[in-house]
């Protein structure tokens, strides 16, 4: 049983339907976080969250978690993921533990699964906090940031690829389905890279700080910045 499935979506409801159809284990609550400018229509028995503007990918995961705080763990998945037979049962088997734990795909795998799906439990959130939706809005480097915090906290990070597929294996279908989003992503990706270097004193695997911004703060520390967020918005 998956307690909660959080599915952020910006476009391509057809892929979202395929992802949901690939689920082969019971799910207690399925929450679609609709970040689209005009609203997503989908004939499924699911729950919906919709903001005034896009939550971004890490923000979508956060809002899904905080709307279901009694869950022992959460699975999140991009709309362009397709789970293979038995994949979800294997992921769920790793999450039956009170210890902090994360399961996600391999960044080096040809299918580019890293953070296109992931599972984490309440103990992990207690230890290192939620995703940093402020520094890494609307997406990218949020995964590196979370892995960095989990590494520093000694949290077990399990890589599982199974037979999961991510689009056509060439990256996000959300971005590649819209030329305007692709153009915006080329800008925001580099802005987020700079945010990561400022937060950890180097690029991923070359960090020099052991706390955010080299400050005497917990690993969960974030810096809300509405001006920077507005500059990185993909909204029309």
Image (cartoon, rainbow, N blue to C red):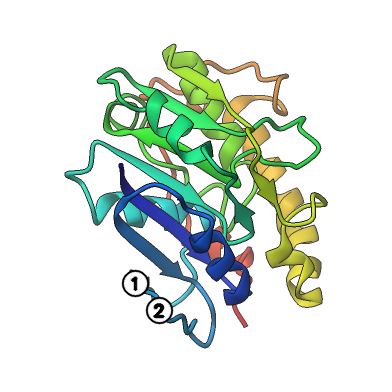
Which residue lies under the disc numbered 1?
Answer: 48
Measuring 62% from the left and 68% from the top, which residue is drawn there?
15
Q: Above or below — where is 165 with respect to 158? A: below
Residue 211 visible here? no
The residue at the point 67 percent across, 30 percent down is 106
Task: Tell me residue 186's x, y (percent).
Answer: 80, 59
Which of 220 and 29 lies nearest the eye of the viewer? Answer: 29
Neighbourhood count class around disc 2 (C-alpha, 10 Å): few under 14, some 14–19, many 20 upward: few
> Looking at the image, is mark 2 or mark 1 nearer the viewer?
1
Residue extending furthest bottom? Answer: 38
Total marks shown come to 2
Residue at (67, 33) in percent of width and height = 197
Residue under numbered circle 2: 52
Residue 18 in the image: above or below residue 39: above
Indicate the position of residue 154 as horizontal and vertical percent values.
Answer: 44, 11
**Closest to the observer: 173 or 219?**
173
Dividing the image into 4 quarters, which one contains the C terminus? bottom right
Expressed as whole percent of the image width and height from the top left, the position of residue 55 reads 46, 64
Few, some or many C-alpha atoms within 10 Å of disc 1 (few <14, some 14-19, many ≥20)? some
Judge from the rendering whether residue 232 lies leftward or rightward of residue 69; answer left or right. right
Instruction: Using residue 8 as the reference point, say whether residue 15 is left or right of it.
Output: right
Q: Is residue 166 visible?
A: yes
**Residue at the limit of the structure toward the top, as seen here:** 154
Distance CA(mark 2)–CA(mark 1): 13 Å
Q: Position of residue 38 (x, y in %)?
A: 52, 88
Q: Is residue 236 above or below residue 77?
A: below
């Amino acid at each position: 049983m998956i307690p909660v499935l959080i599915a952020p979506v910006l476009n391509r409801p057809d892929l979202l339907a395929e992802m949901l159809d690939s689920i082969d284990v019971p799910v207690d609550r399925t929450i679609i976080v609709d970040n689209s400018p005009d609203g997503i229509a989908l004939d499924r028995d699911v729950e919906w969250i919709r903001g005034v503007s896009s939550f971004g990918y890490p923000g979508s995961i956060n809002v899904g978690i905080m709307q279901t705080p009694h869950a022992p763990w959460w699975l999140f998945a991009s709309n362009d993921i397709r789970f293979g037979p038995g994949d979800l049962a294997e992921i769920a088997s790793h999450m039956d533990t009170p210890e902090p734990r994360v399961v996600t795909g391999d960044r080096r795998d040809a299918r580019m699964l890293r953070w296109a799906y992931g599972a984490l439990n309440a103990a992990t959130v207690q230890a290192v906090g939620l995703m940093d939706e402020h520094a890494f809005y609307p997406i990218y480097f949020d995964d590196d940031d979370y892995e960095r915090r989990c590494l520093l906290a000694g949290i077990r990070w399990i890589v599982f690829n199974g037979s999961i597929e991510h689009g056509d294996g060439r990256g996000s279908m959300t971005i590649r389905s819209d030329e305007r989003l692709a153009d915006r992503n080329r800008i925001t990706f580099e802005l987020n890279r700079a945010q990561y270097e400022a937060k950890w004193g180097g690029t991923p695997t070359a960090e020099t700080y052991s706390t955010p911004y080299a400050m005497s703060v917990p690993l969960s520390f974030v810096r809300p910045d509405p001006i920077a967020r507005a500059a990185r918005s993909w909204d029309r």
